[in-house]
C-alpha cells in the first residue's frame, strides 16, 4: 500500500447469485472484472468464517474455517460432484436483494451432502495434503461440527459432560462413531478453500488485492473455545468469567455487550503466542491484507463480568501490546495489516499503531460533529491511513445525509463547499478520493447511492443485519466508467 490507490468494500454474501447468497462462483469473477474496469486495486470483504449467532461473520463457529455457504454449486457441477437437477429447482429465496439465512441453511447443507456422497474416491491425495497443511485447527473443527450435528446443533455447553470436557475416551468414541460426518466436514472445508484459492488467484492475476477482516474475538459457541479452553478466562465448568464488549461510543451510546470470551493473555504469552501466530499465518494465506478488527483491544480491552447485563459496568485491562506483534513478525515476517482503530482511542493505542507502522482508519462520516479539530476531517489526515466514507457498521452515506441532525449536516455542506440542494453521495466520494490518505475504500452501497435499506449492519441489534445483496443490473458499464474516471482524476 505504498502508492495512492482505492478499492471497494462488499462482502461475498452480497454478490449476485441464483442461489440465495453470494458465492465463490461466476458472479465473484465478474465482480473482479468490474473492479478492474473501475481501475480499483483492492476488494475488501468481511470475515470468511462460518456465521452462527445473528448471522454475523463476527460470531463464528471457527476462527479458521470458511463458510460453507460460499461454496458454488456450478463449480461443483463442473467438478462432476453435482448434477444440475440437484439444485437448479430449489427455492433459495424470492428476494434477490436479501439473504434468507434460515432458508439457505436448510437447503444448502443437504445439497453439499450430495456432493460429498458423489466425491467418494475423488481428491484423496489432495484432501490428505489439505489435512496435513491445516492440522492445527481442522481435526478439532470437523469433530466439533460432527458432534454439534449429533446434538441437534446445540452449543457445546449443552453436550454430555464427557465430550464437553473433551475426555480422551469420549474423543476416541466420537471420532469412531462419527467418522463419516467428520469426513463430510473435511470435504466441505477442502472444497471451500479450493474455490476461494482459485478466486483469489484470479483477483491477484488481475492486479486486485484482497483485504480480509480478522475479528479480535471468537464466539463462545465455537470449535476454538471448545478445543482450546486454556486460551480463555473460564471457571471449572468452562463458563466464561469475563466477556467482551466496549464502552459507550459513536456506534452505540450505551456501549456494546458482545458476549465473546476474553483471552487469558498471560497464559497465551507463556505459549509464545502460538495460537495467534497460527491465526495470522492462516489469514495471510487467505488475504493479501488483513484488516485487524478492534485493534485497540490489543493495547487495552474492555472486560465485563459475565453476569453483568450492561457494558458500562466493565473496565479497561491491558492487552498483550507490542510483544504479540513482535512474535508474529519473528514467525511470519512482515504482514500487511490495517489497524481498525475506531472507538475510544488513547495515546497508548496510537503509539502502538505508529510503532508498528500500521495504517489506521479514517471514517468521513464521523467528521462533522465536533469542529475543525475532528481527526476524521480530511485536512487532519496523515498519509499512512485508509479512508472510508463509512464501514459495514455505519449508515450508508445517503442514509446519513437523510438522517443527520441539522448542525452536522450544515457543517458537512460548508466543509464540502456544497449546498443542501446539491449535496449527495458523490460529494463525499470525491472528498475521500481527494484526501492524502494512501488508500480509500468505498462501500458498494455508497457508489450506488443507496439509503439505509441497504445498510449492512446496525451494531447491538440482531435479526435484520448482514442480508443486503447487490443486484446484477446495478453493476453497470456506466457506473464502472464513472468510478474509473474518478479514480484516475484523483490519481488513485
Image (cartoon, helix red, strand yellow):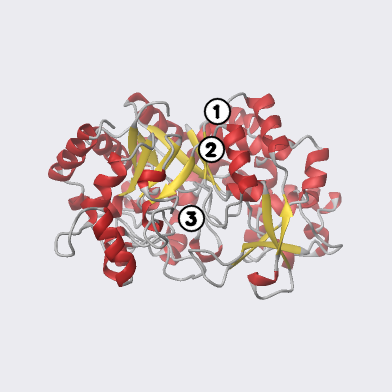
- Name the residue carrying label 2: 190
- Name the residue carrying label 1: 126
Residue count near mark 2 (Cα–Cα under 10 Å), binned few <14, some 14–19, many ≥20: many
Q: Earlier in the sequence, mark 2 or mark 3?
A: 3
**Dot 1: what SS?**
helix
- Name the residue carrying label 3: 109
Which part of the image, by quadrant, shows the C terminus?
Answer: top left
Left or right position of 351 against 87:
right
Residue at 18% from the left image edge and 52% from the top image edge: 473
* Of 273 and 221, the residue lying toward us: 273
Q: Which of marks 3 and 1 is nearer the N terminus?
A: 3
Residue at 62% from the left image edge and 66% from the top image edge: 152
Query: Is mark 1 in CB contact (under 8 Å) with mark 2?
Result: yes
Which part of the image, by quadrant, shows the N terminus?
Answer: top left
Res 351 label = none
Residue 148 x, y percent position in the rendering: 65, 59
Residue 312 x, y percent position in the rendering: 65, 71
Quadrant in which residue 199 is drawn: top left
Query: Is mark 3 in CB contact (under 8 Å) with mark 1?
Result: no
* Of 314 and 422, the residue lying toward us: 422
Left or right position of 245 against 93:
right
**Dot 3: what SS?**
helix
CA distance for labels 1 and 2: 9 Å
Residue at 71% from the left image edge and 74% from the top image edge: 308
Residue count near mark 3 (Cα–Cα under 10 Å), binned few <14, some 14–19, many ≥20: some
- Whether residue 69 appears in this view of the structure is yes
Residue 114 x, y percent position in the rendering: 46, 49
Q: Which of marks 1 and 2 is nearer the N terminus?
A: 1
Residue that protrudes farthest toward the bottom in the picture: 309
**Dot 2: what SS?**
helix
Residue at 71% from the left image edge and 31% from the top image edge: 327
Residue count near mark 1 (Cα–Cα under 10 Å), binned few <14, some 14–19, many ≥20: few
Amino acid at each position: 500500500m505504498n502508492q495512492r490507490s482505492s478499492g471497494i468494500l462488499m462482502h461475498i454474501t452480497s454478490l449476485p447469485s441464483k442461489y440465495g447468497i453470494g458465492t465463490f462462483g461466476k458472479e465473484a469473477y465478474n465482480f473482479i472484472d468490474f473492479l478492474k474496469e473501475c481501475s480499483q486495486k483492492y476488494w475488501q470483504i468481511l470475515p470468511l468464517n462460518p456465521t452462527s449467532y445473528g448471522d454475523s461473520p463476527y460470531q463464528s463457529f471457527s476462527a479458521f474455517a470458511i463458510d460453507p455457504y460460499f461454496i458454488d454449486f456450478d463449480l461443483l457441477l463442473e467438478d462432476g460432484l453435482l448434477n444440475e437437477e440437484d439444485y437448479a429447482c430449489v427455492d433459495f429465496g424470492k428476494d434477490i436483494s436479501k439473504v434468507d439465512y434460515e432458508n439457505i441453511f436448510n437447503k444448502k447443507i443437504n445439497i453439499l451432502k450430495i456432493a460429498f456422497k458423489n466425491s467418494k474416491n475423488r481428491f484423496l491425495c489432495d484432501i490428505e495434503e489439505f489435512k496435513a497443511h491445516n492440522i492445527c485447527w481442522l481435526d478439532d473443527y470437523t469433530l466439533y461440527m460432527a458432534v454439534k450435528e449429533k446434538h441437534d446443533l446445540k452449543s457445546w455447553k449443552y453436550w454430555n459432560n464427557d465430550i464437553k470436557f473433551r475426555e480422551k475416551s469420549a474423543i476416541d468414541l466420537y471420532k469412531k462413531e462419527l467418522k463419516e460426518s467428520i469426513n463430510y466436514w473435511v470435504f466441505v472445508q477442502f472444497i471451500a478453500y479450493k474455490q476461494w484459492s482459485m478466486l483469489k488467484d484470479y483477483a491477484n492475476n488481475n492486479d486486485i488485492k484482497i483485504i480480509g477482516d480478522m475479528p479480535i474475538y471468537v464466539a463462545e459457541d465455537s470449535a476454538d473455545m471448545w478445543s482450546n479452553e486454556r486460551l480463555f478466562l473460564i471457571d471449572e465448568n468452562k463458563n466464561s468469567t469475563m466477556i467482551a464488549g466496549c464502552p459507550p461510543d459513536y456506534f452505540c451510546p450505551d456501549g456494546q455487550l458482545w458476549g465473546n470470551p476474553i483471552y487469558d493473555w498471560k497464559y497465551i504469552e507463556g505459549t509464545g503466542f502460538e495460537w495467534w501466530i497460527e491465526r495470522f499465518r492462516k489469514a495471510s494465506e487467505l488475504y493479501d491484507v488483513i484488516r485487524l478488527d478492534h485493534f485497540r483491544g490489543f493495547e487495552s480491552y474492555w472486560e465485563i463480568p459475565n453476569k453483568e447485563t450492561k457494558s458500562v459496568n466493565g473496565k479497561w485491562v491491558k492487552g498483550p501490546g507490542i510483544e504479540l506483534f513482535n512474535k508474529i513478525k519473528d514467525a511470519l515476517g512482515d504482514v500487511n495489516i490495517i489497524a481498525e482503530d475506531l472507538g475510544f482511542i488513547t495515546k497508548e493505542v496510537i503509539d502502538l499503531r505508529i510503532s508498528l507502522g500500521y495504517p489506521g482508519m479514517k471514517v468521513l462520516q464521523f467528521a462533522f460533529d465536533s469542529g475543525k479539530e475532528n481527526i476524521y476531517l480530511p485536512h487532519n489526515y496523515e498519509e499512512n491511513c485508509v479512508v472510508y466514507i463509512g464501514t459495514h457498521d455505519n449508515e450508508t452515506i445517503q442514509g446519513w445525509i437523510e438522517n443527520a441532525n441539522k448542525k452536522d449536516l450544515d457543517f458537512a455542506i460548508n466543509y464540502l463547499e456544497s449546498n443542501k440542494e446539491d449535496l449527495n453521495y458523490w460529494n463525499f466520494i470525491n472528498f475521500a478520493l481527494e484526501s492524502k490518505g494512501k488508500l480509500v475504500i468505498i462501500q458498494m452501497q455508497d457508489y450506488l447511492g443507496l439509503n439505509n435499506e441497504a445498510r449492512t449492519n446496525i451494531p447491538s441489534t440482531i435479526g435484520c443485519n448482514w442480508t443486503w445483496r447487490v443486484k446484477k443490473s446495478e453493476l453497470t458499464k456506466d457506473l464502472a466508467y464513472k468510478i474509473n474516471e474518478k479514480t484516475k482524476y484523483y490519481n488513485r
